[in-house]
Amino acid sequence: MPIKILNRREKQEILENLRERFGIQEIPFMLAQFGKEKIFAFSGDLSERQLREIEQTAFVECMGVYFAKIDERTKEIRLSIEGSQLLKNQITENIFELENEEQLNQWMKGQDLQISTGKRGFFIIKYKEDFLGSGKASENKIGNFIPKNRRLKN
């Protein structure tokens, strides 16, 4: 599947969603979509034209870092671990701070947190100064999205 460099309007839609949910005011890099849902952030020196030329001569699986996933059905955006770290200085809303190392270990092992936030939707998970990606809150838990290959082993 070819690289889809997001145009200004598409990037603005993502920014509006992130502004509403997390208070983010700016996305200071190019965004590219691979597949239907995965968004990558790229801040290199290559122009969109140069990236297209590379894509025509070589297989490009992705570029930049995995930034976010857009739910195709609901259009909600879930920031990846790297996405939350790239924008950590802008995130001002819907932050869930882990209280202790026990919660941190539980989260990093890929377990859901059995906690009620009083809200629904995506939260940025944070422990001290570290941003750990996104979780989705429901009535009595925060669902974990850490990929299996990045989880701590038991």
Image (tube, grey):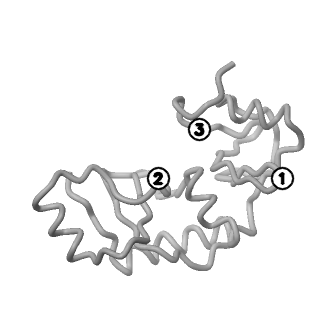
What is the distance, in whole Å, between disc 1 and disc 2 at their CAs?
25 Å
Under mark 1, the amino acid is Lys
Work out whether 110 lies above or below 5: above
The quarter of the rendered structure image containing the C terminus is top right
Q: Give the label, 3 or 1, closer to the camera.
A: 1
Q: Earlier in the sequence, mark 3 or mark 2?
A: 2
| 49 vs 117, nearest the viewer | 49
Q: Is residue 94 left or right of residue 65?
A: right
**Residue at position x 77%, y 31% in the image:** 105
Under mark 3, the amino acid is Ile
Under mark 2, the amino acid is Lys
Q: Give the label, 1 or 2, closer to the camera.
A: 1
Q: Is residue 67 left or right of residue 142?
A: left
Identify residue for label 1.
Answer: 128
What is the distance, in whole Å, between disc 3 and disc 2 at their CAs?
13 Å
Q: Which of the 4 image quarters holds residue 106? A: top right
Q: Earlier in the sequence, mark 1 or mark 2?
A: 2
Residue at the far left: name it.
57
Work out whether 140 lies above or below 72: above
Identify residue for label 2.
Answer: 69
| Dot 1 alpha-carbon crowd within 10 angstroms: few under 14, some 14 to 19, many 20 or more | few
Q: Are marks 1 and 2 in contact (CB under 8 Å)?
A: no
Q: Are marks 3 and 1 in contact (CB under 8 Å)?
A: no
**Residue at position x 15%, y 55% in the image:** 58
| 14 vs 118, nearest the viewer | 14
Work out whether 42 lies above or below 76: below
Q: Which of the 4 image quarters holds residue 124? A: bottom right
- Which element type, helix, strand or loop, lies under badge 2? strand
Residue at the far right: name it.
99
Identify residue for label 3.
Answer: 146
**Whole-percent x, y for residue 79 in the image:** 56, 55
